[in-house]
Image (cartoon, rainbow, N blue to C red):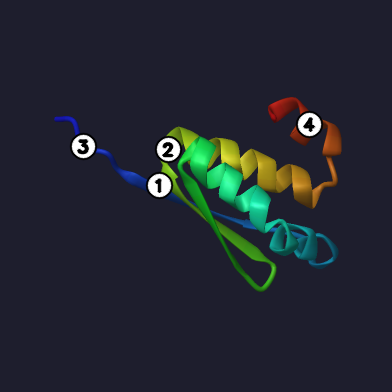
Amino acid sequence: MDQETETTSEILVPEDRIGVLKAAKEFQKEISEKLGAKISIDGNSAQISGEGFGVWQARAIVRAIGRELREMIKAIR
């Protein structure tokens, strides 16, 4: 049984930080390419979908953006 299952996760991002995530189109593309996770934004909610581990990593990055943890983002890159 070697089936890939898509995982989805939703995370709320503060209103004052969601603009940063929306404006980072190149960053979203990089996450998609490196982690295989897609980020969709609706209001102040970010939905992340893809393969399990990639979604988990992308969720941590989105959470870091929401909390303004620039050093964490630099460490992941």
Residue carrying label 3: 3
Q: Name the residue under label 2.
A: 52
C-alpha gap between disc 4 and disc 2: 22 Å
Secondary structure under the numbered disc 4 in the rendered image: helix
Amino acid type at image mark 2: Gly
Q: Which amino acid type corresponds to the residue marked 4 in the rendered image?
A: Lys
**Residue 8 rendering spot, x and y as whole percentages:** 45, 52
- Of callouts 4 and 1, which one flags the residue occurring earlier in the amino acid sequence? 1
Q: Which amino acid does label 3 sit on?
A: Gln
Counting from the top left corner in percent of width and height, residue 37 is at: 49, 46
Whether tag 2 and tag 1 are in contact, CB under 8 A, the answer is yes
- SS class, disc 1: strand
Local packing at callout 3 (Cα closer than 10 Å; few below 14, some 14-19, many 20+) is few
Q: Quadrant of the C terminus?
A: top right
Q: Mark 4 points at which residue?
A: 74
Q: Height in image: 75 above or below 41?
A: above
Residue density around tag 2, few if under 14, some if 14–19, many if 20 or more, within 10 Å:
some
Query: Residue at horizontal 84%, vertical 32%?
Result: 71
- Which of marks 3 and 2 precedes in the sequence? 3
Q: Quickly name the residue at label 1.
A: 7
Give the Cα separation between the discs numbered 2 and 3: 12 Å
CA gap between label 1 and label 3 equals 13 Å
Question: Label 2, label 1: how many angstroms apart (C-alpha)?
Answer: 5 Å
Q: Position of residue 52 (x, y in %)?
A: 42, 38
